[in-house]
Image (spheres, grey):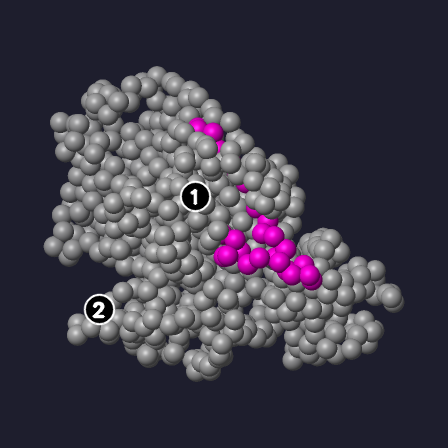
């Protein structure tokens, strides 16, 4: 049964349609073409003709014309609309005419960089002139690096390598910086939050070095759909950027289905999202429809891979192919060679289904998939469209199914589809002038080139001088003859991670066989909950028992096992305010905004039985705390309100409200749910009263908590509406969270908070 036939069958299936809250059909659109812009090298036009490209899409022609005229551009069109040509063609055209010209390509991941080299090499086969394009990252052999520095016309790298491996050593890259004509930033939408704030400062350092060598490159950016692409591109690059957002590429018909799992208990609990996603994905897979499933966490990815592999092994797929169809996992922590193998399998069709975190959300070439299943709302409209766009990348019918979880945000969206389909995607927020981030990169910039008196870096010259003077007091810089010189022995870039608080990953070593082998890696915070002693670590469906986590050496030793359970651990987080920047009474509660220190510690883990998800045991975790300074917005419950609750009731109300705010605030702050965390304290050591903290999940904060402070009443109103509209009796994950109780208490607290503290029955 092909996809069109399956969709028609589902439309007439009462049990399936009973769970469908919305079925949107996006009609096919024909292509719109334009002629090649003047100035494009004729050899390129001839090479494109050999590939069957005789005209450009309208957005491609517009973007290339701007680039050739020396104007920076950001192209915002859907997946598989040919954005790559919008920067490759002006770059190659310029190099063909001026062989000394150079281009620097930035991609957020190594996989995308490898994809780009293959694309350039394929186009280069049709040209008489060799274009010297190289990937320069941590995997580049030492023997090749001098050649890239001297002869590389297109240098393809990632922000991390630019930050630590290129800018601090710019004297080795004189040919690149003297002749740098273009800087390409693809997947622009990935640079949000702390990562984007860091990249904006890396670009400031890049442009500063370019000025020193006499160059001023044009920036060519490409992005998936976000609400503010021009603003983001200009904040990242510091230059005026022209927006190209009218897509001329064709689009096949797409069916976007909202699926709310059935209620399975009397008190309103719904079927777990993984179980529902397993069933929905199985319908596509059993008909031989190549499918991608997105999950929210690494653990969910591995559990779902395990389930789908078991279904195929039991013959549920019903496929009669000679070769067994493959179901693979894909997430951070897999080795690069393993990820490349999975990507190739998807392109060739050898892999029938893949379960992924958002690692495959970016534009890695994985061929033409027909169906996408989203196991839970990914957190933003932009991400949801990007994930749905991984199916139907070319012409032809495709389907995307959003399977809602029980979270308040998922339930709001699945029951209010107009919000999703009628609203523009979110703004990508960055805060490059965050003092912690800015000061870190100002140190890096001073290491690279001395600062002149009166020079500005992000901030105005006077503010820049204040930070430089502070660094002089700390014996990091020395001010001599109107210049600020680096005087520390340390190499600053190595101590600054662009993506997280910790730069070091943990290596996972399989000791099963006689030869120990590395099977993956994991960041510090994830290691605390997934690689602790006695954890069951799952890697592509294979279970491993963690024998020892060596915290100091950053190594986890595991061996293969076959057990009927997996482990799950949570981080216990405490919050301690350090400084209050502003506070006031607003209606019934007191709100505050300030600087806090969080301490995250994994304390216990649960053993969860596969399939039934029963809790079959637990164990203790003995690991150090992970501390972070950040910004928070917090609510204090006044004494006159607290006295109206029993202690247990007030505790339930605070926990319920913290779950609601953590789930719903991202919708109003236009951020990813992972950007915020909430903690409830029945008696805060700082305030002495019941307090709820909502904090930025990044060192130094990125401005979200302050926005939440400003939207205090709006957020509480949204939380009350969610509680009152939830059909459950006493509480469930869709309103007050996993505790499943305390709905009445949470509702009562919200009414008191919104009615200026008066008595509520």
Q: Count all numbered tags in the image, as a single digit.
A: 2
Is residue 637 within the magenta segment?
Answer: no
Q: CA distance from mark 1 to mark 2?
A: 36 Å
Looking at the image, residue 474 sits to the left or right of residue 737; the answer is left
Q: Which mark is residue 339?
A: none
Q: Which mark is residue 284?
A: 1
- At horizontal 38% and vertical 31% (from top left) the residue drawn is 394
In the foreground, 200 or 731 = 731
- At horizontal 57% and vertical 64% (from top left) the residue drawn is 677
- At horizontal 57% and vertical 57% (from top left) the residue drawn is 271
Which residue position holds label 2? 517
Q: Evaluate whether residue 439 shows in this view.
A: no
Q: Secondary structure at mark 1?
A: helix
Marks 1 and 2: CB-CB under 8 Å?
Answer: no
- At horizontal 74% and vertical 73% (from top left) the residue drawn is 650
In terms of image quadrants, where is residue 41? top left
Looking at the image, residue 516 sits to the left or right of residue 79; the answer is left
In terms of image quadrants, where is residue 624? bottom left
Q: Is residue 291 above or below residue 558?
A: above
Q: What segment is highlighted magenta in the picture?
A: 251-277
**x, y percent for residue 104:** 28, 42
**Badge 1 local density, few (<14 within 10 Å), some, or many (20+)?**
many
Q: Which quadrant of the rendered structure holds the C terminus? A: bottom right
């Amino acid at each position: 049964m092909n996809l069109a036939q399956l969709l028609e069958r589902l439309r007439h299936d009462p049990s399936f349609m009973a769970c469908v809250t919305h079925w949107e059909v996006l009609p096919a659109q024909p292509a719109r073409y334009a002629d090649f812009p003047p100035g494009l090298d004729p050899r390129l036009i001839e090479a494109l003709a050999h590939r069957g490209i005789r005209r450009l899409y309208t957005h491609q022609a517009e973007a290339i014309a701007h680039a050739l005229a020396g104007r920076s551009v950001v192209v915002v069109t859907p997946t598989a609309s040919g954005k790559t040509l919008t920067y490759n063609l002006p770059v190659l055209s310029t190099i063909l005419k001026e062989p000394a010209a150079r281009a620097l390509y930035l991609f957020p991941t190594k996989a995308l960089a490898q994809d780009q080299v293959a694309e350039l090499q394929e186009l280069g086969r049709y040209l008489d002139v060799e274009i010297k394009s190289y990937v320069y990252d941590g995997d580049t052999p030492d023997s090749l690096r001098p050649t890239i520095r001297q002869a590389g016309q297109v240098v393809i790298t990632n922000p991390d390598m630019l930050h630590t491996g290129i800018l601090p050593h710019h004297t080795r890259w004189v040919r690149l910086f003297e002749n740098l004509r273009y800087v390409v930033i693809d997947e622009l939408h990935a640079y949000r939050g702390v990562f984007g704030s860091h990249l904006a400062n890396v670009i400031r350092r890049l442009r500063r070095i370019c000025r020193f060598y006499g160059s001023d490159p044009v920036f060519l950016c490409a992005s998936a759909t976000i609400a503010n692409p021009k603003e983001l591109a200009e904040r990242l690059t510091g230059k005026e950027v022209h927006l190209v957002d009218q897509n001329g590429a064709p689009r096949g018909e797409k069916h976007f289905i909202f699926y709310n799992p059935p209620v399975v208990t009397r008190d309103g609990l719904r079927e777990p999202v993984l179980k529902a996603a397993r069933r929905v994905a199985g319908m596509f897979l059993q008909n031989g429809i190549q499918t991608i499933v997105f999950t929210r966490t690494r653990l969910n990815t591995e559990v779902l891979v395990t389930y789908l592999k078991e279904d195929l092994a039991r013959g549920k797929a019903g496929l009669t192919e000679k070769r067994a169809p493959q179901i693979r996992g894909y997430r951070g922590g897999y080795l690069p060679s393993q990820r490349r193998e999975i990507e190739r399998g998807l392109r060739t069709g050898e892999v029938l289904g893949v379960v992924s975190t958002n690692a495959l959300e970016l534009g890695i070439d994985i061929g033409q998939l027909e169906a996408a299943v989203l196991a839970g709302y990914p957190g933003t409209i932009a991400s949801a469209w990007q994930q749905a766009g991984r199916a139907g990348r070319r012409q032809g019918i495709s389907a995307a199914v959003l399977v809602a979880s029980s979270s308040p945000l998922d339930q709001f969206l699945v029951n209010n589809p107009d919000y999703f389909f009628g609203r523009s995607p979110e703004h990508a927020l960055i805060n490059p002038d965050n003092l912690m981030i800015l000061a870190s990169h100002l140190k890096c910039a001073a290491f690279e080139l001395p600062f002149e008196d009166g020079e500005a870096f992000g901030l105005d010259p006077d503010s820049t001088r204040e930070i430089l003077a502070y660094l002089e007091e700390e014996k990091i810089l020395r001010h001599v003859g109107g210049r600020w010189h680096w005087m520390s022995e340390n190499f600053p870039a190595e101590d600054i991670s662009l993506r997280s608080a910790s730069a070091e990953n943990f290596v996972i070593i399989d000791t099963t066989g006689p030869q120990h082998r590395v099977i993956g890696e994991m960041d510090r915070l994830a290691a605390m909950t997934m690689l602790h002693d006695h954890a069951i670590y799952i890697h592509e469906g294979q279970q491993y028992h963690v024998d020892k986590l060596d915290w100091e050496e950053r190594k986890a030793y595991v061996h293969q096992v076959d057990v009927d359970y997996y482990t799950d651990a949570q981080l216990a987080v405490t919050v301690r305010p350090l400084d209050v920047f502003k506070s006031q009474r607003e209606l019934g509660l007191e709100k505050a905004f300030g600087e806090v220190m969080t301490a995250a510690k994994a304390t216990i883990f649960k053993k969860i039985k596969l399939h039934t998800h029963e809790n079959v045991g637990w164990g203790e975790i003995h690991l150090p705390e992970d501390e972070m300074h950040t910004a928070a917005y917090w609510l204090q419950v006044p004494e006159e309100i607290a006295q109206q609750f029993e202690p247990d009731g007030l505790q339930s109300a605070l926990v319920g409200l913290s779950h609601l705010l953590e789930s719903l605030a991202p919708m109003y702050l236009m951020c990813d749910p992972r950007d915020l965390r909430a903690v409830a304290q029945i008696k805060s050591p700082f305030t002495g009263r019941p307090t709820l903290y909502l904090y930025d999940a990044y060192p130094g904060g990125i401005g979200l908590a302050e926005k939440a402070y400003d939207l205090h009443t709006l957020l509480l109103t949204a939380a009350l509406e969610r509680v009152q509209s939830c059909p459950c009796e006493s509480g469930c994950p869709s309103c007050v969270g996993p505790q499943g109780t305390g709905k009445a208490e949470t509702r009562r607290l919200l009414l008191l908070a919104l009615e200026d503290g008066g008595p509520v029955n």
